[in-house]
Amino acid sequence: GENVEQHPSTLSVQEGDSAVIKCTYSDSASNYFPWYKQELGKRPQLIIDIRSNVGEKKDQRIAVTLNKTAKHFSLHITETQPEDSAVYFCAAPKGDQAGTALIFGKGTTLSVSS
Amino acid sequence: EPEVTQTPSHQVTQMGQEVILRCVPISNHLYFYWYRQILGQKVEFLVSFYNNEISEKSEIFDDQFSVERPDGSNFTLKIRSTKLEDSAMYFCASSAGGPGQFFGPGTRLTVL
């Protein structure tokens, strides 16, 4: 089955700096990679995702890159702000059927200090 | 914007008791999921449900767990005989089948 590794586990940056979180996956058939942001005591919220037919996707200050050959994908946050402080989880599909469940990485706690 | 809702927000129970966690998925979604998150750890998949039957389950989802869609809107997770290690946040999620699963606010289950 799919296995997702995520690092670093914690990341501290100064406001305005960039942050990068990396994940690797094991199943070469995986074709969809979402990222979730979870603030303390809240639900995981989908912030960006990427399909395997593209190498990069951007949405304002966040971007995700995918390297299918190496089976890794990364989240990039530019111009970080204190409100970006949260736990970020990457995920990959468990199977290849429609509606398959997600397998999550262990999470990265991002702290942005002003 | 429609959201997944869950009740109760917090459930405290004694070890060995049965609990039922309730979820209302987004109305036009067809796939429903339960995940759990032990405090400070990652989100773990439990079970997915489609067309009134379980489509996938993890090794965590043993005979103590069951799911049901009792009517056209609710989706429930039952734990028959709770154990201390069942204490966690339980998230319901739903999707239309394409990319994107949307999570509810969670139910914090505390087993004493």
Image (spheres, rainbow, N blue to C red):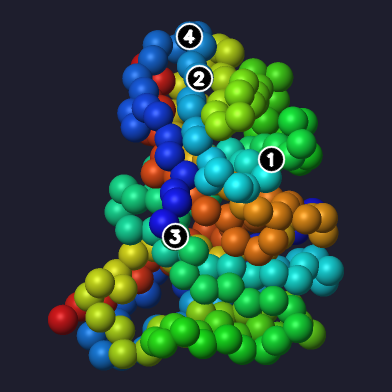
- The answer to whether B6 is drawn above or below residue A51 in the figure is above
Are the two marked residues, 2 and 1, in contact with CB atoms closer than 8 angstroms?
no
Q: Residues within 10 Å of mark 1 (few under 14, many from 20)?
A: many
Which chain's residue wears label 1?
A: B
Are the two marked residues, 3 and 1, in contact with CB atoms closer than 8 angstroms?
no
Which residue occupies 48% across, 16% down? B19
Which chain's residue wears label 4?
A: B
Residue B4 % position (x, y): 47, 44
Q: Which amino acid does label 4 sit on?
A: Gln
Question: Which quadrant of the view contains residue B58?
Answer: top right
User: Secondary structure under badge 2?
Assistant: strand
Q: Name the residue under label 4.
A: B17
Q: Name the residue under label 3.
A: A45
Q: How crowded is mark 4: few (under 14 residues within 10 Å), some or many (20 or more)?
A: few
Residue B37 % position (x, y): 48, 43
Q: Earlier in the sequence, mark 2 or mark 1?
A: 2
Which residue occupies 69% across, 76% down? A51
